[in-house]
Image (cartoon, helix red, strand yellow):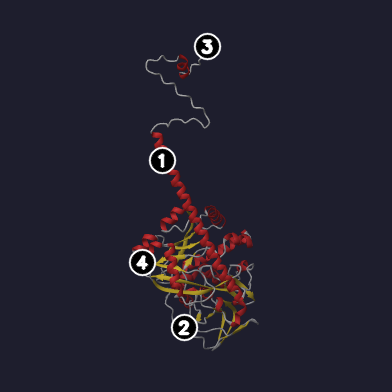
């Protein structure tokens, strides 16, 4: 099957997750994908589209972790600031990496259509807002993104941000008009259905027990069957298990939970009129409107797993803090998942050894990066596309184990505290400036009113000698000619 027959050949997809059996028989394929998240399913769909035989092994079920539990924001870029990316690899390679990220956005947009995945419910636009008044920094970022990376962006001034978000906590913003949102759960299940239509075989409840990487044909052992493949793609995030412990240990597990409110009606529309996703520059707040009048809001990150319900109250308090007009909103559901975050902040994409590939480390990266990685690896295996080498500078680095998780938790707390303090200081300064403008306006108004009544009598400068008043003339007395002359400014004395 050729690349030109892509979307039309896929046919309409079903977003509901069909039942998929455990692998119970030995199997021989060209490519084995470990992990049925967005990255793994994209590899499967694209490789099957290009004519390869593909099997996907999933230890639980499709989209059970982060791929099926996210806010569904799709926008260009990576999890590190563009300035850091340039510093690490140089401007030219940074541009190529950014171009790949934009390809990921295009891939998801082409896939997330009503024809392929009914009910996918996309919405347009993403807004990144600042917790502090950082206008100059905003201008520099806009110039870099627009001029050096050919990304469509708009700078929003404070008044415009606050006109669509009824809160004084945010200042300037960067608007990405070509970014969009979708239902993450429907997307991952729809992607599985599309991969199946292309001929890929997905086996749920099939954990990997061991892998033999030696030889041209790799051997994979599962609890009930064996599988052989020329290529293995590891796309299982932090849950790859004991056979791949060394790879899992290069990722810091980070959990993030999201809460969905009950319908809020007109009250929500009165406060928030922007229907795309909103994230702050410190990565603390991330929210968007869904179903017209419900708010979907994610909690801050944590490096320890917990019951999702514990975070419902925390999210409700955060909503009330940012938008006090909404008060304590009722929470309908809380869900979450774990992602793997790399030490360097970039994803792990490429070939570890001949026939062994990795697509992981997508924490803080966005759906576009997972999709791009899947497409890139499929083309690398079957077409020889070597652009995966652009990710070579971002090597596998040990994440520190338990010590790393403790450090990550402490750093997260410190970052949130620092962000809160910086935001409070920025709002205090803004309030002080507003009071000063009011004081100056009142002073100007007072001066204007004084000017309309005529000039006030001029006061002599300090230290000046006041002229003595003329002596009083008694009735019937002759006036003193000398005193009269001096009072009139005429010098007295003899001629």
Residue at image location 53% in from the left, 31% down from the top: 463
Q: CA distance from mark 2 to mark 1?
A: 77 Å
Q: CA distance from mark 3 to mark 4?
A: 99 Å
Q: CA distance from mark 3 to mark 1?
A: 55 Å
Q: Earlier in the sequence, mark 4 or mark 2?
A: 2
Checking the image for residue 494, the label placed there is 3
Checking the image for residue 445, the label placed there is 1
- Secondary structure found at label 1: helix
- Secondary structure found at label 4: loop
Residue 304 location, x and y as percent? 53, 75
Q: Label 4 belongs to which residue?
A: 264
Q: Are marks 2 and 1 in contact (CB under 8 Å)?
A: no
Q: Does residue 430 lie above or below 228 as drawn? A: above
Residue at image location 44% in from the left, 78% down from the top: 17
Camera sees residue 320: yes
Residue 234 location, x and y as percent? 57, 77
Q: Nearer the viewer, residue 174 or 419?
A: 419
Q: Are marks 2 and 3 in contact (CB under 8 Å)?
A: no
Q: Earlier in the sequence, mark 3 or mark 4?
A: 4
Q: Given the current orientation, which residue lies at the most extreme left position?
A: 266
Q: Label 2 belongs to which residue?
A: 20
Q: Nearer the viewer, residue 163 or 431?
A: 431
Q: Earlier in the sequence, mark 3 or mark 1?
A: 1
Q: Nearer the viewer, residue 398 or 362?
A: 398
Taking the image as shown, residue 275 lies to the left or right of residue 416, namely: left
Q: Are marks 3 and 4 in contact (CB under 8 Å)?
A: no
Q: Earlier in the sequence, mark 2 or mark 1?
A: 2
Of circles 3 and 1, which is in front? Answer: 3
Q: CA distance from mark 1 to mark 4?
A: 44 Å
Checking the image for residue 167, the label placed there is none
Q: CA distance from mark 4 to mark 2?
A: 38 Å
- Secondary structure found at label 2: loop
């Amino acid at each position: 099957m050729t690349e030109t027959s892509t979307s039309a050949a896929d046919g309409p997809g079903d977003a509901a997750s069909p039942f998929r059996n455990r692998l119970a028989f030995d199997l021989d394929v060209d490519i084995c994908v470990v992990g049925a998240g967005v990255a793994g399913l994209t590899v499967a769909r694209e490789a099957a589209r290009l004519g390869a035989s593909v099997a996907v092994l999933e230890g639980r079920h499709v989209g059970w972790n982060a791929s099926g539990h996210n806010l569904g924001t799709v926008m260009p870029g990576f999890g590190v600031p563009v300035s850091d990316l340039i510093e690490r690899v140089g401007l030219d390679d940074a541009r190529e990496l950014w171009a790949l990220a934009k390809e990921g956005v295009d891939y998801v947009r082409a896939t997330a259509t009503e024809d392929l995945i009914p009910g996918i419910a996309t919405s347009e636009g993403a807004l990144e807002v600042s917790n502090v008044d950082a206008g100059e920094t905003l201008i520099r970022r806009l110039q870099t993104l627009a001029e050096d990376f050919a990304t469509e962006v708009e700078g929003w001034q404070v008044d415009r941000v606050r006109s669509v978000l009824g809160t004084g906590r945010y200042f300037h913003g960067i608007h990405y008009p070509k970014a969009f949102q979708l239902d993450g759960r429907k997307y991952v299940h729809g992607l599985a259905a599309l991969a199946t239509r292309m001929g890929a075989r997905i086996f749920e409840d099939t954990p990997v027990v061991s892998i033999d990487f030696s030889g041209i044909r790799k051997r994979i052992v599962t609890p009930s069957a064996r599988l052989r493949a020329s290529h293995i793609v590891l796309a299982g995030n932090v849950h790859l298990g004991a056979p791949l412990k060394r790879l899992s240990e290069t990722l810091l597990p980070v959990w993030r939970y999201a809460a969905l409110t009950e319908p809020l009606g007109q009250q929500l529309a009165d406060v928030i009129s922007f229907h795309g996703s909103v994230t702050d520059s410190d990565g603390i707040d991330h929210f968007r409107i869904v179903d017209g009048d419900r708010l979907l809001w994610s909690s801050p990150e944590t490096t320890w797993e917990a019951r999702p319900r514990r975070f419902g109250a925390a999210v409700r308090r955060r909503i009330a803090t940012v938008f006090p007009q909404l008060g304590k909103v009722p929470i309908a559901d809380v869900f979450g998942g774990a992602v793997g975050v790399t030490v360097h902040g970039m994803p792990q994409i490429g070939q570890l050894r001949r026939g062994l590939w990795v697509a992981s480390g997508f924490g803080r990266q966005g759906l576009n990066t997972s999709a791009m990685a899947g497409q890139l690896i499929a083309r690398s295996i079957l077409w020889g596309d070597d652009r995966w080498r652009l990710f070579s500078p971002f090597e596998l680095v040990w994440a520190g184990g338990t010590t790393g998780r403790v450090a990550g938790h402490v750093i997260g707390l410190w970052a949130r505290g620092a962000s809160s303090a910086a935001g409070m200081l920025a709002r205090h300064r803004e309030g002080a400036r507003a009071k000063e403008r009011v004081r100056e306006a009142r002073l100007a108004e007072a001066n204007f009113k004084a000017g309309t009544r005529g000039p006030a009598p001029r006061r002599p400068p300090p230290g000046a000698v006041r002229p003595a008043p003329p002596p009083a003339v008694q009735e019937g007395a002759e006036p003193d000619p000398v005193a009269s002359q001096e009072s009139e400014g005429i010098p007295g004395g003899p001629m």
